[in-house]
């Protein structure tokens, strides 16, 4: 079992930056794939970015490529999502998720563990 806790959300103006953190407890991230998803009001949860801990492969949604970066720390317990050039349409609750294995999947149903989410609001 792994417990996930997100932090770093907040209110930012368009064009600004935020860095989200996903901290693991119960077990380290080694051997897992960690993804970020988001859900805006009235919309379905959507894939944002994913990182395979074993080989550091990453994948991004087209809507965030070139603006967001997923990374990890060397202590095996935290994954980050650096978000730059934020747009109002990035406003959502952002969730961290984890699954066993190294496949960099973007399907929410593939993930076994989820955090509670952190709100990101981008004002225009």
Image (cartoon, helix red, strand yellow):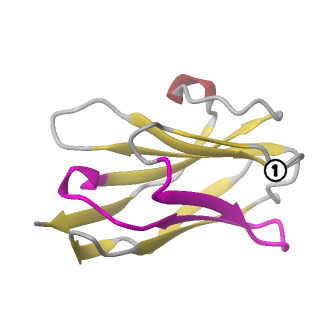
Q: Position of residue 3 (x, y in %)?
A: 64, 56
Q: Position of residue 49 (x, y in %)?
A: 55, 45
Does 81 appear above or below 61?
Answer: below
Q: Nearer the viewer, residue 73 or 100?
A: 73
Q: Residue at x 62, y 32 (%)?
A: 111
Q: Residues within 10 Å of mark 1 (few under 14, many from 20)?
A: some
Does 118 appear above or below 30?
Answer: below
Left-right relation of 114 to 23: left
Q: How many marks?
A: 1
Q: Nearer the viewer, residue 95 or 58?
A: 58
Q: Residue at x 15, y 34 (%)?
A: 42
Q: Position of residue 40 (x, y in %)?
A: 24, 44
Residue 60's image quarter? top right
Left-right relation of 61 to 25: left
Residue extending farthest to the left is 124
Q: What's drawn in magenta, residue-wise?
A: 65-92
Residue extending farthest to the front is 66
Residue 27's image quarter? bottom right
SS at badge 1 = loop
Q: Residue at x 65, y 29 (%)?
A: 105
Does 30 appear above or below 112?
Answer: below
In the image, residue 59 lies in the stretch drawn in magenta: no
Q: Quadrant of the C terminus?
A: bottom left
In the image, residue 88 lies in the stretch drawn in magenta: yes
Left-right relation of 95 to 114: left
Q: Position of residue 84 (x, y in %)?
A: 41, 68
- For label 1, the residue is 56
Does 21 appear above or below 53?
Answer: below
């Amino acid at each position: 079992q792994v417990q996930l806790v997100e932090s770093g959300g907040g209110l930012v103006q368009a064009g600004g930056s935020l860095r989200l953190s996903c901290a693991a407890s119960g077990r380290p991230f080694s051997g897992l794939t960690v993804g970020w998803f988001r859900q805006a009001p009235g919309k379905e949860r959507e894939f944002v970015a994913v990182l395979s801990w074993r080989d550091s492969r990453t994948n991004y949604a087209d809507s965030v490529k070139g603006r967001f970066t997923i990374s990890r720390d060397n202590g095996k317990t935290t994954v980050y999502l650096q978000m730059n050039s934020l747009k109002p349409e990035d406003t959502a609750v952002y969730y961290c998720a984890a699954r066993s294995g190294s496949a960099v999947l973007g399907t929410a149903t593939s993930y076994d563990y989820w955090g509670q989410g952190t709100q990101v609001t981008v004002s225009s």
